[in-house]
Amino acid sequence: MPKITLPDGSIKEFPNPVTGLEVAASIGQRLAKDALGVRVDDELRDLSFLIEKDAIVTPKNRDGTVNKDALFLMRHSAAHVMAEAIQDVLGNDVLLAYGPPTDTGFFYDMFVPEGKKFSSDHFEKINARMAEIIKEDRKFTRYEVSSAEGLPKLKSEGNKYKLDNAEKALGMPSSVYRGTKSASEAAPTPPLGHSTTSPLSFYATGNPGKDWEDLCRGPHVPSTARIGAARVMSLASAYWHGDENSDRLTRVYGTAFGSQAELDAYLNQLDEAKKRDHRVIGKQQHLFVIDEMVGQGLILWTPNGSVIRRELQAFIGAELRKQGYTEVFTPHIGGLDLYKTSGHFPYYQESQFPPIIERNTLEELCSSGCSCAEMVNRVAGVSARLAAGINERTKSTTIAADRVMADDKLIEGFMLKPMNCPHHARIFASSAHSYRDMPVRLAEFGTVYRWEQSGELNGMTRVRGFTQDDAHLFCTEDQVDNEVQGCLSLVKTIFATLGMKEYRVRVGLRDPDSAKYIGTKESWDKAEASCIAAAKSLGVQFSQEAGEAAFYGPKIDFVVKDVIGREWQLGTVQIDYQMALRFDLSYIGPDNTPHRPVVIHRAPFGSMERFCGVLIEHFAGNFPLWLSPEQVRVLPISDKTNDYANEVVNLLKARGLRATLDSSNDRIQGKIKAAADEKVPYLAVVGPRDAEGRQVSVRVRGVQKDAGALGLNEFVEALAAEYSGRGATTLAQRFGVELG
RNA sequence: GCCACCGUAGCUCAGUGGUAGAGCGCACCCUUGGUAAGGGUGAGGUCGCGGGUUCAAUCCCCGCUGGUGGCUCCA
């Protein structure tokens, strides 16, 4: 007699085991009609799942995109529909392997026989077939068989992938998978409750034995028509078990939504994202270039992009001065010893460019017959000891520059800097500090270099050389909270000015099971507490994530949401109790003895490259006036008005505005079209009438008509005010419109 | 890094085993036009780089290079 606790907390008793559908029906007709599945004791199940004992149940409404369970069920089911459609279109010799739902839809990995072509040309047919299957409204019918029955059945079907899946589900070692992944990965230990006698489940899309079916764990929606709308999206390749030495499979991506309208909205969003792609807009507006001769992942800032970067840097620079920062400059490389001391060399080796070895050392090594491989080993040998965190002479676990062992000096050289902090630490160390001078805040737009895998590179957002809006705050322990607050308020100001209204904060903490962190437990506890307190005080959504800390300390990351709802990881604030120790930094306290400062690393934008990339997408290339490479374009009606047009341009320029003249012999319509395409914020149309009245006819970006005329002086001053106020008030507002 | 696809004019992209195409942009000419493309003429190419097959390769094959997408798991 199952007692079932419903979502509202009420308890219903049933005389016999009941299905999810019956539970739903007991609540209401409408619910029984709309329900797709059921959550029993937090497990998502078929609506037909038989609940035999007491349970907590959440009948699922089909209430659209917000309901993750509903989407999961539809997508999991849509994967079956797509697989059936693909086999209908391409033939049954396409072998299915693995098809789970994902965050944005689902995929199905399948083996396409040699010689068989599968391309996006087939999508139309597949989509049409999927629509038919959905319309046929066939029931998803689950049936269970014993392993003794199921395994031979799968064997006879000749699909080793499914057989492998079944063996895995049963916790058996694989009889077919022969990849290079270890046996434990290929066949994990079975979780509790499974044994070789556990039944396997199949789902037929319709009647077992008659309609299409697939080995599947479920759950599914009751029938195909309950999948609102689905379609195939794209093709990619994948390996069986993600093992590159194993079979190469074709991965077919698809997605499903509760309704055609939601699917369309999703497709529109993809389109919109495509239109905003910073790589595309960057090309159109000549903002930056990546040149293969210069190198992968290295950004060339062209004049237009440089305007944006310079404006941003000036903006941050002004905020930093208000907060008492001082500016420094440091070189792009640093000696190996610097990084041995900081710990970057041993800990970050994989993600750094290889060391730059001094010519003399290189020649010596070469002439003594040292091969390249040996050279790498000898450099790495040094780091291996350091990575172990043990200095052999002192047996201490911290390493200072003076304790680098004598034979470590054999290889001398430099590294392209992966971070600015070691340089800044040496600046701090270059003079004596009193507690009265603390905190010392050193800021630099410092360019750093990191070795990203080529496949990870992406436009401006994933690069190998980038400029951090970096600063290191050397402070006393008492000052940490206050300084972290200062960093957060800076970030708030910046996001507010740029109209990035929604953002959240992620606090990265230690992974309790990992040994990669340096420093004592006490210092970590303290630093983590500061980060959490600061994040709380910010008053925005925040999460804590174990294992996301840097090796030297915990951190606070900023994730902004752009106007179309995508999230971007940007800047970071990190508390570091280790660097001062490693570099033996100190300040003299009121007690006249040396004390260790705490170091706060912070880069609110992260990097200028990434941030500009995000801004391009955020604004879709429609930059606010203060960031626009070209702020205003003067368009003479004909070259009879060129003199006046020139005078207008010169006045604007004299006021510090980035103004240009369109002196082409296009008609005014053509000039406006060109300026609109290039997303110039303001246009000043000038003809004989304007020249005579010493005025300009204004056009505002995003507004499809003449905004009205304005006296020349008033126009120039309004633009100057909008520029210096970074858009706090706009010229567009004066005309009752928005700058789009 | 690995896999798939791609690389043709400044940009977007057609195309072909036999002397290379369009639109936009650019230059020049005509036009002097009041708010999202007036008309004409012209310049512009080592068809990513290297090798191979072929009488002949931008096209077919191999290697490299660069770009784009993808790199999952209780089915």
Image (spheres, helix red, strand yellow):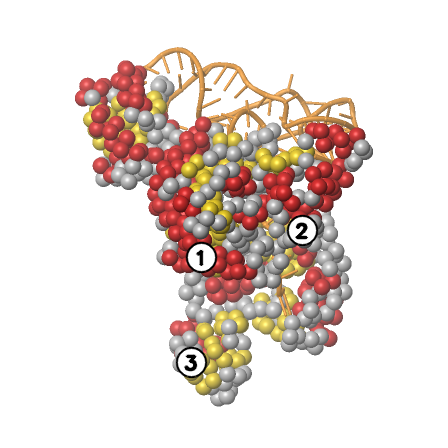
Residue B65, image x, y percentages: 65, 34
Residue in view at x 45 percent, y 32 percent:
A305
The answer as to whether the residues below labels 2 and 1 share one chain is yes
Q: Is residue A252 left or right of residue B26?
A: right
Query: Disc 2, disc 1: CB below 8 Å?
Result: no
Q: Is residue A433 left or right of residue A450?
A: left
Tag nearer the camera, 3 or 1? 1
Residue A577, image x, y percentages: 52, 52
Residue holding disc 3:
A26
Residue holding disc 2:
A394
Let me know if residue A33 appears in the view: yes
Q: Crowding near pointer 3: few (<14 within 10 Å), some, many (20+)?
A: few
Residue in view at x 39 percent, y 73 percent:
A30
In terms of sequence position, does the residue under pointer 2 or pointer 1 come before the other? 2
Residue in view at x 48 percent, y 59 percent:
A526
Say which of A451 and A39 sits in front.
Answer: A451
Inspect the image, locate mark 3, and give the three-letter code of the amino acid beneath it: Ser
Asked if residue A491 is positioned above or below residue A368 in the image, the reply reads below
Q: Residue furthest right?
A: A369
Residue A517, image x, y percentages: 59, 55
Measure the alpha-carbon separation of dots 2 and 1. Answer: 33 Å
Chain name for mark 2: A
Asked which quadrant contains residue A642, the reply is top left
Inspect the image, locate mark 1, and give the three-letter code of the amino acid beneath it: Ser
